[in-house]
Amino acid sequence: MPIYAYKCDACGHTLDALQKMSDAPLTDCPQCGKPALHKQVTAAGFQLKGSGWYATDFKGGGAAASSAAAAAPGSDASPPAACGASCACH
């Protein structure tokens, strides 16, 4: 289920709500009670990488990432020493 960010136009209160995509948007602010909540536009939590793989902030250590890069055909580039295996720069 996606996490939606909301902000109240009346009091400025912000909150995150775990909702189904089919759920109706929240409208009433839990802090002031006014019907002034609106969804905010936020960045996606993942990046599409290459031919169907994706990178998130939640992936594990560098062993799996570096072995997957080594197994890719035509992939002979290795990440720079300072960037680390879990970055999205390569």
Image: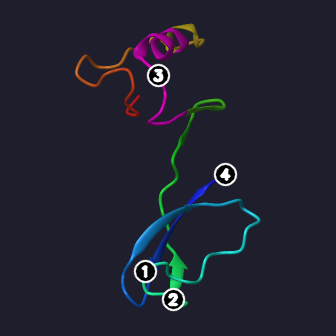
Distance between mark 4 and mark 3 Cα atoms: 21 Å
- Amino acid type of the residue that numbered disc 1 sits on in the rendered structure: Gln
Q: Position of residue 54 (x, y in %)?
A: 57, 34
Q: Which residue is mark 3?
A: 60
**Mark 3: secondary structure:** loop
Q: Position of residue 10 (x, y in %)?
A: 41, 91
Q: Secondary structure at mark 2?
A: loop
Which comes before the other along the chain, label 4 or label 2?
A: 4
Q: Which residue is mark 2?
A: 36
> Around disc 2, counting alpha carbons within 10 Å, would you say few (fewer than 14), some (14 to 19), or many (20 or more)?
some
Which badge, 4 or 3, comes first in the chain's sequence? Answer: 4
Q: Earlier in the sequence, mark 1 or mark 4?
A: 4
Q: What span is colored magenta in the figure? A: 55-68
Residue under label 1: 31
What is the CA distance from the residue labelled 1 to the residue labelled 4? 24 Å
Task: Let me know if residue 57 is in the magenta part.
Answer: yes
- The kind of residue tagged 2 is Ala
- To which residue does mark 4 refer? 1
Q: In x, y percent, where is residue 27?
A: 59, 83
Residue at 37% of width from left, 30% of height from top? 87
Can residue 35 be seen by looking at this rendering? Answer: yes
Residue 86 colored in magenta in the image: no
